[in-house]
Image: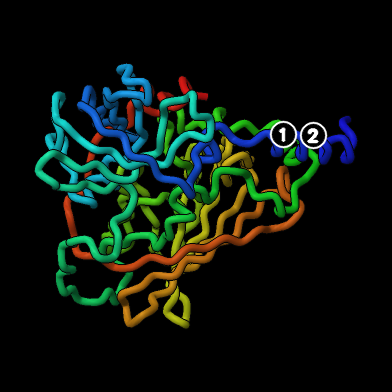
Amino acid sequence: MISRSLILLSILVSHSAGAHHSRAAFSLDSLIEVEGTLIELAWRNPHAFLVIEGMDGNGNSVEWTFEGHSIAGLTRNGWTRNSFKPGDRVVVAARPNRDPARLFGLLNYVTKADGETYYAFSRPSDSSVQPRLPIEPSTDFSGTWRPILNMQQTLVGGFQPPATWPYTEKGLEEFAIFNINDDPGLDCKPYPMPRITRWPYNQRWEVSEGSITIVHEQATTRTINMTPDASLPASHEPDENGYSIGRISDAGSLVVTTTGFAETKWGSERGVSSSEQKVVTETYRLIDGGYGLELTYTITDPEYLTDSVERGRNFRLISDYEFTNEPCDPEAARRHLQFD
């Protein structure tokens, strides 16, 4: 058995090395501009890529690669598959790689020759945006909900396993060997439950008699059994998402308990696997007069955690819009690795 002190030392060493796709490779406080000709727009999930042919300081032709947002994120910012075409003359603003020899940046925005600008992850507050359509508040949790994230969370948040969770020895051993490139998402495997609750894209809730269906953009569809006195069916085969049973509390909150899980790599959080003993309890509460949704949830899993942990997230109600359905492309998911 590995001693706890050695595990903790291993954790310190492995985490001081940094994660390959944690955005740590980019200088997020810097911005560069590259002018050139568009060679490629790889319109793929989980991230689009642009390749630009430009000139270096010595006048030599070089190729720059820029990583952008997901298709859903770009679409929200006004992009389409046909916004750019090879041969377009563009100016790209990006956060550069900390190693100047790596011509790889994190896309900020692209400006075409006619002056039209397309933003990747967020638009400045003074940029032109489509006005929000007036919508009725939700009274039964139905509607399309967008997670509330700031730029820090979008670019750098959540790329390491939680350092303060109460891990068992088994959990600590896994923590110590964490490598971001082991993420099942790089093989286009969808987020399991409860990681799917922290998916950074929109979700549409459809309420019907006896059930609630949650459609996650670019991901899975989840069903919550709202039948009174429901229980885990004997026919349920354990899987990464479990079986969810919900009820409305006296206070009007939606309380969902999910069991029936299978052993899942990184099933509780990035870098934290889960066992068949995992239980997830979610509490949803309508706030802001029905225009906001508050989520808190607890994870209990005695195989990996010595005590329960709690997480949360807030959402805002938005007008319905057409979800993107661009599939995840394994080549795009791992494309950044060529620059590591």
Q: Is residue 30 visible?
A: yes
Please state the horizontal and vertical placement of residue 205, each as a whole percent of the image.
Answer: 29, 60
| Within-10-Å neighbours for mark 2: few <14, some 14–19, many 20+ | some
Disc 2 residue type (three-letter): Ser
Q: Nearer the viewer, residue 238 or 27?
A: 27
Q: Position of residue 274 (x, y in %)?
A: 62, 41
What residue do we see at 47% from left, 82% from top?
250
Viewer-proximal residue among 267 and 81: 81
Secondary structure at numbered mark 2 = helix
Give, as a three-letter code, the residue at label 1.
Answer: Ser
Q: Is residue 146 above or below residue 157?
A: below
Q: Which residue is labeled 2 in the image?
A: 10
What residue is at 41 percent from the left and 26 percent from the top? 103
> Residue tagged by mark 1?
14
At 44% from the left and 37% from the top, the residue drawn is 96
Describe the colour scheme in one phrase.
rainbow
- Distance of mark 2 from mark 1, alpha carbons? 6 Å
Label 1: state its secondary structure: helix
Q: Residue at x 45, y 46 (%)?
A: 30
